[in-house]
Image (cartoon, rainbow, N blue to C red):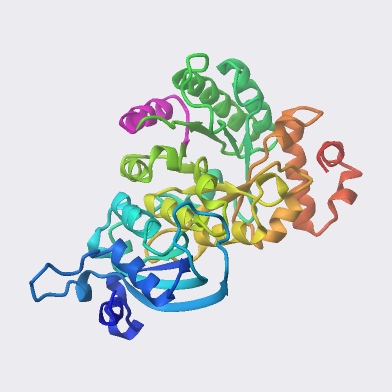
Amino acid sequence: MQASDIDGFFAEPHQIDLEKHLILDYTLECVGDPRTAAAHLCSEQSTAQWKRVDVDEDLRPRFGAKVLELEVIEQRQALSYPVQHAAQGDIFACRVKIAHPHENFGPRIPNLISAVLGEGPFFTPGIPLIKLQDIHFPDSFLAHFQGPKFGVQGLRDQLNAHDRPIFFGVIKPNIGLPPDAFSAIGHEAWLGGLDIAKDDEMLADPEWSPLTERCEHLGRARREAEEATGTPKIYLANITDEVDRLVELHDAAVARGANALLINALPVGLSGVRMLRKHTQVPLIAHFPFIAAFSRLPHYGVHSRVMTRLQRLAGFDTVIMPGFGPRMMTTDQEVQDNIRACLEPMGRIKPCLPVPGGSDSAATLKRVYDKVGSVDFGFVPGRGVFGHPMGPRAGATSIRQAWDAIGAGVDVHTHAEQHPELAAALKAFG
């Protein structure tokens, strides 16, 4: 590109209408001049060739993505990871903030992703490594989306669970149990104090546990647990499947007693979820398969909080995400970034409930609560409830006992001296 061509892809914030643009935060490693690389990045994801040959026109002012900020972090001799066919030369690690006109793709999630995470940015000349770190939507764009139907407050109202975390439990064993055995241990956990008993993300509609039969069993068990405890409960059924089956499975599951639905967000596709959001009468809960596959590398791919924002935009009421601790191989900062993406203001879009998970139990509840910094989260043990040495009812009870101690400002180990279920959990999982 010539200097005048490069300049056409740069702008100051006051020179553009920010309501007409998404703001994208990338980090990248480029070979050669960073300004040229950043201009190529804008060009490739928007106008590409910005005028016709022998025609006096310039499509960039209206349609071109534009660099608002460019910071060179460091110059070095090698890329963070080797990339085949990468150009040779000095490497510049940079941060770049880009404004992209959203009329280029409209309020359509597949087209948005195609622009900001597609061929353009990831095959930009001179940029072997790039990662989309964050995305911000103006109110004019958000106005086209419904977002969560229930959100945090709606879920709390459904469960009559206020001023505390929401307690989930992943029924274990997750694969292999027939519906009657599966429902029996879910019922026990509800009796022990679990708010939500859920299918595992890998359990959907197999022949040995058909969704309809499983929902009949769990729906009955849920109602019995509600009558026994006097408190509302949720059975979270996994309807992950081909997009053309989502509405059918939604209706079948809800009719048989599922009062919330789990969907593996990225394998199904956010457009399919957005479609279902317009139909559903129960909360939609997202699980995170596939996200780590393109978010884990620090210098390439997409930060998981981008996907959290998009899941909220598509209409999920709850987003289950990799949580704290070594099990999920995710930094505390990234987990907290995702939690904020669920809860922070986002125009007219309701907050959704963040559920950071990964090998949790009564022994980890205090740590998770401290790191989240509020009660607006879901706590989702699996073995911490269903692998409890005294059984699932005791496992769920141990979670509630741990919260009783935390809420009262009492050390959980001290509280455990008078509560055998909690003591057993701390011994088994602490």
User: Is 313 above or below relative to 225?
Assistant: below
Front-most of residues 288 and 418:
288
**Quadrant assignment, res 37:** bottom left
Q: Is residue 262 left or right of residue 399?
A: left
- The secondary structure making up most of the magenta span is helix
Q: Is residue 32 magenta?
A: no
Nearer the observer, 65 or 15: 65
The picture quadrant where one finds residue 33 is bottom left
Q: Measuring from the top left, give residue 92's x and y in whole percent.
A: 51, 72
Q: Nearer the viewer, residue 168 or 7?
A: 7
Q: Quadrant of the C terminus?
A: top right
Residue 295 falls left or right of residue 188:
left
Please give left or right for residue 377 compared with residue 409 in the image.
left
Residue 1 place in picture, x, y as percent: 29, 73
Q: Residue at 60% of width from left, 59% of height from top?
A: 334
Q: Residue at x 50, y 42 (%)?
A: 290
Give the percent coordinates (x, y) of residue 426. 84, 42
Q: Residue at x 77, y 55 (%)?
A: 406
Q: Nearer the viewer, residue 119 or 315?
A: 119
Where's residue 333, x and y in %? 63, 62
Query: Magenta part of the protein: which range?
Result: 243-262
